[in-house]
């Protein structure tokens, strides 16, 4: 087992003290940049006790292959994890940051709108490798904007690697470090029903369903496994969970494409589908990965020039985002029908770090 995957109780047992275990966790999550291997000494832990940890539970094999910063402050890390490259994204705001972690190198699903799907599945990540992503990004967060949220929305389908994801969520929530609340950990799925049901039974975080369509015919064109688990079955699982956990809110991710799923009829159907779910809809304008996104601000022109050459190596996509006016009209239509909705405007597009763009470029 790796150091990052150790539970607090396991670390306490190795160190012979919960106080030492707290100091070791503090070193990992609050001590600055994460090294490639455990040092000979850390503050607050007796060297002889620490040596037992270094032998029994080293850090996962990793190196930072690349770090890129976007014009809006978003940072993308390409991490080499024992030969598999995964991408992790840090999204800072004025008061807090969010880390978007990957659960697989590549992806086991074939969603047509996602650059990661073009890679295929390289391998699943273990819990220690998932947690290492959090530690690396958290150490790099801007002063005054500590990491408060973790979203499993990077590379991979979390439900296809659920044992590792559940273990990582448990570690993220452990006190004293990192000590995140369940309300600040969100796991996204493209709709893998068996995993969804298990996560709703066992998980201690929010679940976000990437719905993206209002009819099965529409969704099958975007997400092939909708043939196996159609919309009614997915929303049925959320309704069953709501009956058991009335205080738990459902999150629905809805990527918008021009002329595909952005009509007034889609607004009406989506509101009807979600009736009684107490769901929040996160609207996400599509992020192009086979060609350059439209440049709407002169300030963004220069970063997009850097993206142009790398974009040629990604699979082409005919999908395009709707205009900002259409996005706002769609949101207004949901709000008028009593559906909570926010728009997740793109972050990190100029470095291919936005939703759906992670492909190890």
Image (cartoon, rainbow, N blue to C red):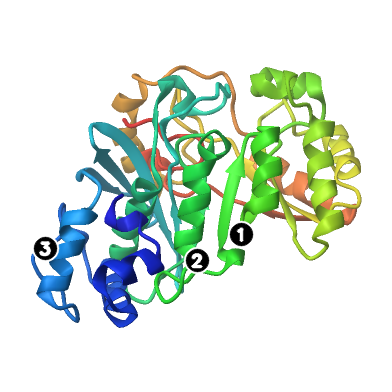
Q: What residue did someone put label 2 on?
A: 173
User: At numbered mark 3, what does the secondary structure look like: helix, strand or loop?
Assistant: loop
Q: Earlier in the sequence, mark 3 or mark 2?
A: 3
User: At numbered mark 2, what does the secondary structure look like: helix, strand or loop?
Assistant: helix
The spot of residue 316 in percent (x, y) is 47, 17
| 128 left or right of 192 in image | left
Residue sitting nearer the eye, 115 or 237: 237
Q: Return the mark for residue 204.
A: 1
Residue 17 visible in rendering: yes
Q: Residues within 10 Å of mark 1 (few under 14, many from 20)?
A: some
| Residue at screen point 84% across, 40% down | 236
Q: CA distance from mark 3 to mark 2?
A: 25 Å
Q: Earlier in the sequence, mark 2 or mark 1?
A: 2
Q: CA distance from mark 3 to mark 1?
A: 32 Å
The quadrant the C terminus occupies is top left
Q: Residues within 10 Å of mark 2 (few under 14, many from 20)?
A: some
| Residue at screen point 91% across, 42% down | 272
- Quadrant in the rendering for residue 118: top left
In the rendered structure, are the residues bearing label 2 and label 1 in contact, judged by CB atoms less than 8 Å apart?
yes
- Quadrant in the rendering for residue 140: bottom left
Residue 301 visible in rendering: no
In the rendered structure, are the residues bearing label 3 and label 1 in contact, judged by CB atoms less than 8 Å apart?
no
How many numbered discs?
A: 3
Q: CA distance from mark 2 to mark 1?
A: 8 Å
Query: Is 120 rendered above or below residue 268?
Result: above
In the rendered structure, are the residues bearing label 3 and label 2 in contact, judged by CB atoms less than 8 Å apart?
no
The spot of residue 334 in percent (x, y) is 83, 49
| 102 left or right of 208 in image | left
Residue furthest toward the left? 40
Q: Return the mark for residue 39.
A: 3
Query: Is 24 rendered above or below residue 59?
Result: below
User: At numbered mark 1, what does the secondary structure look like: helix, strand or loop?
Assistant: loop
């Amino acid at each position: 087992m790796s150091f990052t995957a150790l539970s607090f109780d396991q670390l306490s047992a190795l160190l012979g003290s919960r106080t030492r275990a707290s100091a070791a966790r503090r070193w990992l999550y609050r001590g600055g940049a994460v090294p490639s291997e455990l040092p000979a000494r850390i503050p607050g832990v007796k060297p002889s006790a620490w040596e037992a940890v270094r032998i029994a539970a080293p850090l996962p094999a990793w190196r930072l292959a690349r770090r890129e910063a976007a014009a809006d402050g978003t940072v993308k890390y390409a991490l080499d994890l024992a030969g598999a490259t995964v991408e992790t994204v840090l999204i800072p705001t004025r008061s807090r940051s969010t880390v978007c972690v990957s659960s697989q190198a590549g992806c086991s699903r074939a969603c047509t709108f996602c650059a990661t799907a073009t890679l295929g599945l390289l391998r699943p990540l273990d819990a220690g490798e998932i947690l290492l992503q959090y530690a690396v990004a958290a150490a790099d967060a801007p002063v005054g904007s500590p990491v408060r949220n973790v979203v499993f929305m990077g590379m991979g389908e979390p439900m296809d690697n659920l044992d590792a994801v559940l273990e990582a969520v448990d570690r993220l929530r452990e006190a004293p470090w990192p000590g995140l609340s369940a309300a600040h950990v969100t796991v996204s799925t493209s709709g893998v029903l068996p995993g969804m049901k298990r996560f709703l039974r066992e998980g201690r975080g929010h679940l976000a369903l990437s719905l993206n369509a209002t009819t099965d015919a529409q969704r099958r064109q975007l997400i092939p496994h909708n043939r196996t688990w159609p919309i009614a079955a997915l929303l049925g699982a959320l309704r069953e969970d709501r009956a058991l956990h009335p205080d738990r809110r459902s999150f629905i991710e809805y990527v918008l494409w021009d002329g595909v799923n952005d009509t007034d009829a889609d607004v009406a159907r989506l509101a009807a589908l979600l009736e009684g779910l107490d769901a929040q809809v996160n609207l996400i304008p599509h992020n192009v990965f086979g060609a350059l996104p439209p440049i709407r601000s002169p300030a963004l022109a220069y970063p997009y020039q850097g993206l142009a050459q790398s974009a040629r190596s990604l699979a082409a996509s005919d999908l395009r985002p709707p205009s900002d006016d259409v996005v706002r009209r769609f949101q207004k239509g949901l709000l008028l029908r009593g559906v909570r909705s926010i728009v997740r405007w793109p972050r990190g597009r100029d470095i291919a770090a936005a939703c759906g763009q992670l492909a190890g470029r």
